[in-house]
Image (tube, helix red, strand yellow):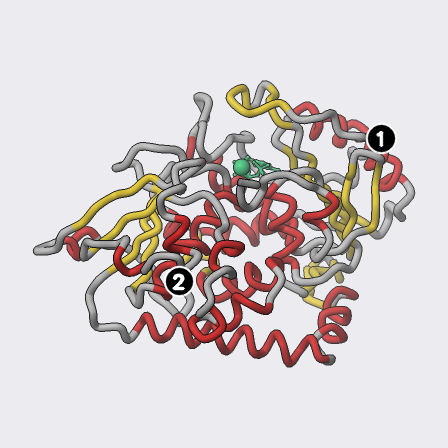
Amino acid sequence: MYLRYTMLNNKFIVNETPSYYKFVMENSSEHHVLKTNIKRHLEQSLQMMNTDKSRKYIVYDCSQANPGVCGGWSDRLSGILSTLVIAILTKRNFLIKHDKPCLLGDYLIPTNLLDWRYNKSMLINKTFLYQDLSARKSTTLRPYLRGKLDVTSYFKHDVDFLRINWDFTEEFRKRPTIGTEIPWMTKLHYADIYRQLFMSLFKPSPLFSDALNKFRNKRRRPYIACAHLRVGRNPNMPGDDPRSTLKLNAVWDYLNNLNKSTYDFFVASDAEHVKNIARNRFPTNIIDSPGKITHIDQSNGNDPSAGFLKQLLDFYTLLDCDVLITSVSGFSIFAAYLRGTDSGLYCLASGGLLPCSRYTINDIFPGEFLAPAI
Ligand SMILES: Nc1nc2c(ncn2[C@@H]2O[C@H](COP(=O)(O)OP(=O)(O)O)[C@@H](O)[C@H]2O)c(=O)[nH]1
Ligand SMILES: [Mg+2]
């Protein structure tokens, strides 16, 4: 994540970036002790599940077999975290069943910490139930999550499939026993939880690595400045909610002031017209990912798998940028979290462009990105 590709004699070589040094500095302080602890605790939680012989399962479900929305990429990552924590609390194995719109495992595969892949043969001779707990459908579950009622009694089947698109961290933190059940949950900011979670669960599949490398080979300059500009309802996403207008000129002015012989530009967006403006303004600096912009929950006539791949390429690219401009979106917020550094991070707020941090981004972009306010 902290490697940079530089052109030398027409070949790309890999260097360490300024953000790498920032990373080393951040990791050489008290920060490091805390983060090492998180990593250890999270790994312990995952390994404990690996050795659990109860043969009972909690499965994050975003599958075509069951009804209900999964939401976009950040909704899914929130749901995966909440479901994983429920599995830890109920001492069950954790799995992911994701084939909407395509198999997650085609693009992201497990690390050696936890094999989360679901296989339907595990249902033989088992009782199972699917529950849609997305959107506002989790009211009954919540007292169990916050420890008012015994959470193990809520899940009565050998295999419980859950569709969740919220982060329930605030509920889990209300459990009087959470300090011993899941110590890392009590201490960390969302940014650190999600970064550790993502790195512990996922790595690119060979297919996705190839796609990432092809895309990275488009790089021509040593630095890359990126923006994620989420517009909301637009011809690419007709089913989406409308959002307030972005101050795009602030972004173009910022990019225009960078040294164009040393920076590539990458503008990710849910709206083609925004990308077109960027292409027209910076025709020689822009690089782009292949495929049509597609919401992963509403394909709008596009090839859903190609749309899923494009959004994942866009997301991974945002994690590697020397400059990252974010906008009001879970997609942006998660990119800021997982990037693991605040170096070159900006938030396109209602008043314009602000330097920001992965620890303040939720305050700058208020809204129900992780959990509902109720
Ligand atoms: N390819 C692509 N898709 C995007 C981009 N921004 C949003 N999307 C699509 O919109 C979905 C919604 O994203 P989500 O993470 O839920 O963020 P939010 O709805 O903006 O809070 C993503 O999963 C993508 O399918 C983008 O920059 N590139
Ligand atoms: Mg969303």
Q: In this picture, is 61 found above or below 22?
A: above
Regarding ligand 1, which quadrant of the image does it lie in?
Answer: top right
The three-letter amino acid code for the residue at tag 1 is: Asn
Measured as percent of width and height from the top left, residue 238 is found at 54, 19
Question: Any mark on residue 133, and which?
Answer: none
Q: Residue at x 58, y 78 (%)?
A: 36
Is residue 269 shown left or right of residue 252? left
Residue at mark 2? 110
Q: Secondary structure at mark 1?
A: helix
Check the picture and name the quadrant holding the N terminus: bottom right
Specify the quadrant of the image occupied by residue 358: bottom right
Q: Secondary structure at mark 2?
A: strand
Within-10-Å neighbours for mark 1: few <14, some 14–19, many 20+: few
Measured as percent of width and height from the top left, residue 178 is found at 46, 68
Callout count: 2
Q: Is residue 217 visible?
A: no
- Indicate if the residue with disc 2 has its beta carbon within 8 Å of ligand 1: no
Question: Any mark on residue 249, and which?
Answer: 1
Specify the quadrant of the image occupied by residue 226: top right
Q: Residue at x 78, y 59 (%)?
A: 343
Q: Residue at x 19, y 51 (%)?
A: 120
Which of the two discs, 2 and 1, labels the residue nearer the N terminus?
2
The three-letter amino acid code for the residue at tag 2 is: Pro
Is residue 290 shown left or right of residue 142? right
Measured as percent of width and height from the top left, residue 200 is found at 47, 66
Q: In this picture, is 219 found above or below 51?
A: above
